[in-house]
Image: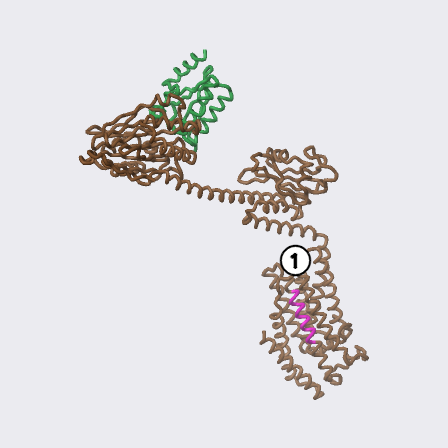
């Protein structure tokens, strides 16, 4: 840019020098000098053009703003030129200047004339270049390859025409070549002058302003450069003469720009005039687009219900498609399906309820599955519109999200037959967007809720884990191994140990019917009962009876608990067990094969009277070293493989038989290993608890002292 | 998804519910709905035919417990017939035969209903 400025300054200086030399010598310069001057001027003004182009970076401002800037700079430049050209010639008529301005005589070529000439030429050239550049930005709105080409061809033809006039004297008429090239340039001017698509995008007020500005611009052009009327330039006396005497091609070029400028002003003026009446429609479209844009943005980000609803309710009005609008949705919080006005724009919700029943209208829509357009609200039996309501016509659009009706968007216009086809289409699109937005917001809420619940469940799981023994107790002469895995976060399986007195231990396994949270609560209750009641009961059946009585108060009618309770007596070497509806314990003793201990007994909670106690039968076992007892929940035997086959009792009995010689840990591991091998997967679909107890027998010294230890379980 | 269904049949005063498939925590609601419907229609002589019941979980058993008292109070009963051995075993382990009339054949069960209602 600095380079262009420097080139221009040097060329301008040399050009001035050329004229001064002419003036001082009083003679016409030689041909060589003239050509050199021409070349310098050409290069200089070319540099000026490039300089201006670089300097003036057009921001993306409105066309009116651009026109205004152009006019202001034009006015300043013209004023400078006008004042300069008038200095010293106030009394002299403008016309006098013309003929006296002569190379032949050199009379009029004085120093003031040179200054005036240079100033006028310079200002007019800058003005012309600015005009050209500005119009270019208009012409190339919505540009295509051909529009760019047309513009460039016009400029080239203008330059060609200008160069051809290099040898013309001032005022001299043009020869044929020049005419031809001028005509070609004019054709491209016409083509470019009709590129006016930018006008369509203007709002009404801006169109009006542009109309005036184009008029003023045309006036300035005509009055300064006075196209065709040599010498008679109102604003700058003698402007054309000055220009032509200064440098003919520049004068031609500026003249062409002036013609093109006036032409463009004319076409733009007319086009603006014709487009004025359709501005309203265009503005509505623009409003629709803007509203749609904001709504679409909302879909992605807003999860505050109220703000989302307010935006949706206001969208038809904002877009200019309705006078009032409101959003209706079922009142989910109260649990009813009554439709409620969630948000309203330009109308009070109370007023809406006065003239329409939301629930009825929405159910009407649901049955038809389509939009509801009431052209004449006052005449419709579903509405109770009075004259003060300003409801002429009503449009109701259902909001569907994933094939489910989630609400309706109502719009009204104060006039009858207010909704045109395109209004309905626009609002329909809003309704579709709104449905997605609401659905998204709900999904988001659900997700938050889900995460909260899963955190709660994680806590519950931890709490439940602590209800189970952390380690199996180590009792003299006995090995015990136990584990419990809930199918979900929490489950209804339970096992526990308690020290009843110095040589007796209570062992329980239980299974609450059902799964999940409700089962987990009853499991916790069972734990409380076991820890408190077991010490009071002298026998397994007595404990189960007490437990049944305690649970009867709280268990739901459809919930029951199966359990096995056993008392291990280390002193007397006995194991008494009773079964309350639970999966029978597996035992393997002496040289016998494994078997199930299937004593009769109802599940806890199945009977709340005497029947329960009557149903219980205890099994009394005198322990022999090597006796194994396997307690488990139905998750073990009912586990199914890929084909749906249950693990079953037979497999369990078999595996216990096979590993009977191992200690409790070994048997426990062997059973789980066999189960996993059978399932072919690590996933269990039911709570699964497994407890293995093996009696190894007491060493003689222990038998005499009956001293046993139990690591207290927390 | 659900592989459980309830079929309705009537023989005289007896409302027969044919259970098909697997009755577990997820499908228990279907049986509940079926029994509720019987109660609503005032058909309280309910016979559950379990010939095609392949599996029952504790939650499934809970359904019978939930309604037996009401049905008996209104002069009816829930009897269970035709269970497959494996399913019967689940009923038996919990002691259901002590609480419910569990009969081998449907005809016999219908006969019992008819005898008691006469």
Which of these two is toward me, A412 or A662? Answer: A662
Which of these two is toward me, A572 or A514? Answer: A572
Q: Position of residue A419 (x, y in %)?
A: 68, 42
Within the magenta stretch, is there residue A322? no
On screen, B47 above or below A683?
Answer: above
Scheme by which the image is coloured? by chain
Q: Position of residue B69 (x, y in %)?
A: 45, 21
Q: Give the chain of mark 1.
A: A
What residue do we see at 41% from left, 24% from top?
A608
The part of the image, by quadrant, that contains residue A15 is bottom right
Asked if residue A619 can be seen in this view, the reply is yes
Which of these two is toward me, A462 or B5? Answer: A462
Within the magenta stretch, is there residue A130? yes
Asked if residue A651 can be seen in this view, the reply is no
What secondary structure is the stretch in magenta mostly built from?
Answer: helix
Magenta residue span = A121-135
Which of these two is toward me, A497 or A645? Answer: A497
Q: Quadrant of the C terminus of chain A?
A: top left
Q: Position of residue A269 (x, y in %)?
A: 72, 60
On screen, B72 above or below A146?
Answer: above
On screen, A350 above or below A4?
Answer: above
The residue positioned farthest toward the top in the image shown: B118
The residue positioned farthest toward the front in the image shown: A705
In the picture provided, is A310 more to the left or to the right than A175? left
Q: Callout 1: few (<14), some (14-19), or many (20+) C-alpha neighbours within 10 Å? A: some
Task: Give the color of chain B as drawn.
Answer: green
Supply the letter of whichever chain is brown. Answer: A
Q: Which residue is mark 1?
A: A197
The part of the image, by quadrant, that contains residue A109 is bottom right
Q: Position of residue A106 (x, y in %)?
A: 73, 85
């Amino acid at each position: 840019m600095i380079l262009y400025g420097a080139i221009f300054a040097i060329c301008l200086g040399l050009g001035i020098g050329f004229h001064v030399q002419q003036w001082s010598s009083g003679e016409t310069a030689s041909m060589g000098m003239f050509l050199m001057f021409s070349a310098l001027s050409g290069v200089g003004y070319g540099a000026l053009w490039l300089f201006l182009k670089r300097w003036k970076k057009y921001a993306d401002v409105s066309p009116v703003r651009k026109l205004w800037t152009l006019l202001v700079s034009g006015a300043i430049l013209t004023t400078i030129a006008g004042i300069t050209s008038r200095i010293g010639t106030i009394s002299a008529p403008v016309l006098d200047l013309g003929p006296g301005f002569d190379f032949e005589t050199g009379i009029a070529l004085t120093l003031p004339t040179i200054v005036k000439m240079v100033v006028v030429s310079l200002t007019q050239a800058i003005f012309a270049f600015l005009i050209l550049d500005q119009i270019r930005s208009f012409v190339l709105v919505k540009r295509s390859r051909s529009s760019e080409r047309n513009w460039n061809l016009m400029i080239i033809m203008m330059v060609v025409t200008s160069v051809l006039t290099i040898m013309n004297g001032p005022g001299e008429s043009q020869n044929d070549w020049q005419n031809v090239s001028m005509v070609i340039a004019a054709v491209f001017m016409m083509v470019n002058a009709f590129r006016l698509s930018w006008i369509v995008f203007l709002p009404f007020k801006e169109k009006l302003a542009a109309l005036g500005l184009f008029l003023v611009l045309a006036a300035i052009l005509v009055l300064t450069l006075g196209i065709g009327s040599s010498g008679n330039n109102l604003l700058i006396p003698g402007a054309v003469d000055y220009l032509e005497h200064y440098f003919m091609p520049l004068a031609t070029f500026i003249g062409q720009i002036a013609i093109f400028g006036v032409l463009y002003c004319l076409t733009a003026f007319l086009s603006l005039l014709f487009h004025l009446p359709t501005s309203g429609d265009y503005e509505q479209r623009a409003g629709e687009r803007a509203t749609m844009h904001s709504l679409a943005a909302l879909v992605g980000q807003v999860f505050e219900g109220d703000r989302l609803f307010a935006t949706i309710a206001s969208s038809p009005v904002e877009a200019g498609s309705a006078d009032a609008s409101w959003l209706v949705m079922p009142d989910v919080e109260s649990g009813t399906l009554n439709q409620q006005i969630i948000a309203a724009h330009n109308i009070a919700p109370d007023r809406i309820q006065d003239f329409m029943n939301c629930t009825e209208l929405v159910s009407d829509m649901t049955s038809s599955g389509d939009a509801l357009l009431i052209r004449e609200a006052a005449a419709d039996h579903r509405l109770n519109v009075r004259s003060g309501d300003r409801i002429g016509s009503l449009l109701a659009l259902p909001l569907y999200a994933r094939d489910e009706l989630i609400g309706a968007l109502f719009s009204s216009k104060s006039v009858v037959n207010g909704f045109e086809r395109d209004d309905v289409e626009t609002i329909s699109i809003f309704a579709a967007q709104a449905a997605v937005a609401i659905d998204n917001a709900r999904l988001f809420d659900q997700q938050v809720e889900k995460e909260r619940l899963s955190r709660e469940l994680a806590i519950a799981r931890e709490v439940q884990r602590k209800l189970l023994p952390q380690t199996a107790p180590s009792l003299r002469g006995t090995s015990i191994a136990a584990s419990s895995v809930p199918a979900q976060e929490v489950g209804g399986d339970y096992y526990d140990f308690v020290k009843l007195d110095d040589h007796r231990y209570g062992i329980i396994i239980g299974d609450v019917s059902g799964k999940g949270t409700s089962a987990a609560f009853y499991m916790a209750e069972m734990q409380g009962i076991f820890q408190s009641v077991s010490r009071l009961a002298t026998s397994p059946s007595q404990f189960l009876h007490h437990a049944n009585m305690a649970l009867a108060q709280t268990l739901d009618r459809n919930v029951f608990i199966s359990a096995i309770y056993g008392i291990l007596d280390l002193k007397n070497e006995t194991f008494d067990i009773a079964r309350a509806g639970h999966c029978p314990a597996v035992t393997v003793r002496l040289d016998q094969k494994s078997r199930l201990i299937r004593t009769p007994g109802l599940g806890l909670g199945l009977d709340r009277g005497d029947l329960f106690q009557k149903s219980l039968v205890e099994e009394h076992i005198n322990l022999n070293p090597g006796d194994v007892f396997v307690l488990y929940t139905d998750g073990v035997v009912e586990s199914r493989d890929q084909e749906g086959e249950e693990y079953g009792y037979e497999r369990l009995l078999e595996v216990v038989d096979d590993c009977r010689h191992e200690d409790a840990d070994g048997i426990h591991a062997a059973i789980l290993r066999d189960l996993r091998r059978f399932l072919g997967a690590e996933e269990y679909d039911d709570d699964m608890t497994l407890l293995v107890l093996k009696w190894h027998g007491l060493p003689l010294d222990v038998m005499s002292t009956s001293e046993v230890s139990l690591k207290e379980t927390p | 998804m659900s592989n459980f269904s309830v079929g309705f049949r009537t023989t005289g005063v007896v409302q027969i519910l044919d259970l098909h498939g697997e009755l577990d925590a997820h499908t228990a609601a279907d049986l509940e709905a079926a029994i509720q419907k019987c109660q609503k229609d005032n058909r309280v002589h309910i016979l559950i035919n379990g010939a095609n019941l392949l599996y029952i979980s504790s939650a499934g058993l809970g359904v019978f417990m939930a309604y037996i008292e009401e049905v008996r109070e209104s002069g009816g009963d829930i009897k269970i017939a035709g269970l497959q051995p494996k399913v019967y075993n689940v009923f038996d382990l919990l002691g259901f035969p002590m609480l419910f009339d569990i009969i081998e054949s449907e005809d016999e069960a219908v006969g019992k209903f008819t005898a008691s209602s006469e």
